[in-house]
Amino acid sequence: MNIQQHITTATINAVKELYNQDLPEAQVNLQDTRSEFEGEITIVVFPVVRFSKKSPEATANDLGEYLKEHIEEITAFNVVKGFLNLSIVSSYWIDLFQTDLLKESFGTIPSNGKKVMVEYSSPNTNKPLHLGHVRNNLLGYSVSELLKASGSEVYKVNLVNDRGIHICKSMLAWQKWGNGETPESSGLKGDHLVGKYYVIFDKEYKKEIEALKEAGQTEDEGKKNAPLIKEAQAMLLAWEAGDEEVISLWKKMNGWVYDGFAVSYKNLGVDFDQYYYESNTYLLGKDTVEEGLTKGVFFKKPDGSVWIDLTADGLDQKLVLRADGTSVYITQDLGTAQMKYDDFKMDESIYVVGNEQDYHFKVLFLILDKLGKSWAKGLYHLSYGMVDLPSGKMKSREGTVVDADDLIAEMIATAKQKTEALGKVDHFSEEEKESLYYKIGMGALKYFLLKVEPKKRLLFDPAESIDFQGNTGPFIQYTHARIKSLLSKAEYKNGQHVANNIALSATELEMIILLSRYPAEIASSAKAFSPATLANYIYEVAKMFNKFYHEIPPIVKEEDEALKQHRLNLSWVTANVLKSGMRILGIEVPERM
């Protein structure tokens, strides 16, 4: 039993013995003691006051006396208003360090038997990935890895939006103006080539609308009557009817896009266990609509359209099937949700989708719940905010979007420039340099986007992200490389324990306590679906190591062998936590920089 569990149990016993009351375990609130107060663990006493019928200070003193008497590791306590700060004997932390933290497996959480699906990326096959997709992919991947690290079995899935009017726009533009251009003939990545024709369609379509407006039509009439949009709509109907020529063109152009996406995904370091395609799922959901009508969850209007009334739940009426029997988005989402559950039988399903879809997911989950789907309780929308750049908001159709591939290339180039300016890679081979620049550039990008709570909109500044000081990926990577260099110089061998009566400095004690929190940080980050929690913890570890490193004399020159071994052990555990935590975020840490 660790000290936190021991204190929790003893606090429950104290309330029983002192006040003859049963304190629920959920109301025992333990925190790390704030740095300005004596102690390592703090109990928030306010929940106990209703049982003690005393002031918070008097209650805290009662508990402090009881715990000091019943737990030998507690050496002293102090009370600050309703907070009870407990001082733990340093030998406890050294024992914990040597029995738990020095294990290779430290930070590994056993399986919890839960199956979780994370759906992320969900790109359209009419354009390349952009900065918004980058946040989505990095968030989806790191949440998946967090859930895995916390003991769940995780399935990463990608629902590709590969059909519809927007896909036909690129196809039609290529047919009209492409002159047979291919990725090979143009030298463009396939997704960029297809995106080029989506932009061309939009420009030509706008010209047609302007011409119709000059001929006396309104903007809305022009949008509906422009010949290009009518041709695109006819192409979509031909696709739905299985027209061989249209299907062949669709397969060819989508193939180009998938080849392009594969390169982007590899560079982003993300992967998927299963792909779903809207071309296979867009007809799903009609069975679910029939089921809903039978159960009285849906109702039909006189025109034959099918709806659900969610006004009693604070939402509105929602169309689930058009009068002509065709699906709307929510219809296919209902069907796809059922299909995914049938395929994987997961306990939870996380949808990583931007916050502009908040309402859609409220409606989707509520409908599934009303249909009596037991698994609907495990659905969660991981809603995230938009990413802006210092130069302003991204736009999608005008061809001014911040392209993911361009951004990755810019990050690697900036990493190269900043690293070479420091002059520390002169002895690296060209291959080592290229690998290092990639790791630093991508580490900077990923860490900057992941250290912010998903729900928050964020301003991404590439220059600020590649800084070897402060709360950045490169600072953490550099700290890891510095530790590896130290261990190499000292010819360090893991596993050599030292006596637990060794005198620890205040910073060393702080470090052990901070490092011991690593498994709990993984668990709480996973519970909140927030890589930001873990990212900021890793930064605290790196910052604490740098403080320790600068406070003590050089470790390799330390003459006291036990102290030297202990400090090398502490450095080794720190490097492991940094590497393991950053790996969960999808970030590689170099061995040397």
Image (cartoon, rainbow, N blue to C red):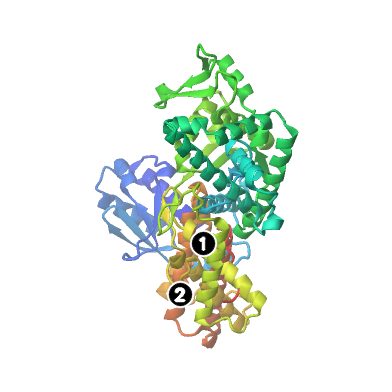
Residue 55 vs residue 359: left or right? left
Question: Relative to 417, is 429 on the left or the right?
Answer: right
Instruction: Kindly give the residue lying farthest to the top in the view shown.
Output: 302
Where residue 481 sits in the image (x, y, percent)? 56, 75
Q: Which residue is mark 2?
A: 546
Report the number of numbered marks.
2
Residue receiving disc 1: 445
Q: Position of residue 280 (x, y in %)?
A: 68, 34
- Mark 1 vs mark 2, CA separation in Å: 23 Å
Is residue 113 at least partly visible in the picture? no
Answer few, some or many: residues within 10 Å of disc 1's Cα (few below 14, many 20 plus, some between 14 and 19). Answer: many
Name the residue nearer the viewer: 505 or 501: 505
Query: Which residue is located at x 44 percent, y 70 percent?
Result: 543
Give percent across and percent down for residue 121: 58, 47
Q: From the image, state whether disc 1 or disc 2 is nearer to you.
A: 1
Q: Residue at x 42, y 25 (%)?
A: 316
Residue 368 lies, with reference to residue 572, above or below; the image says above
Residue displayed at 45% across by 40% down: 356
* 65 or 499: nearer the viewer: 499
Q: Position of residue 445 (x, y in %)?
A: 51, 62
- 155 shown above or below 368: below
Mark 2 crowdedness (10 Å alpha carbons): few <14, some 14-19, many ≥20: some
Q: Amino acid at mark 2?
A: Asn
Residue 388 in sight in this render:
yes
Secondary structure at numbered mark 1: helix
Going by the numbered disc 1, the residue's amino acid type is: Leu
Does residue 496 lie above or below 316 as drawn? Answer: below
- Which is nearer the eye, 257 or 33? 257
| Among numbered discs 1 and 2, the one appearing first in the sequence | 1
Which residue is nearer to you in this view: 1 or 146? 146
In this view, the residue farthest toward the front is 215
- In the rendered image, which quarter is residue 314 located in? top left
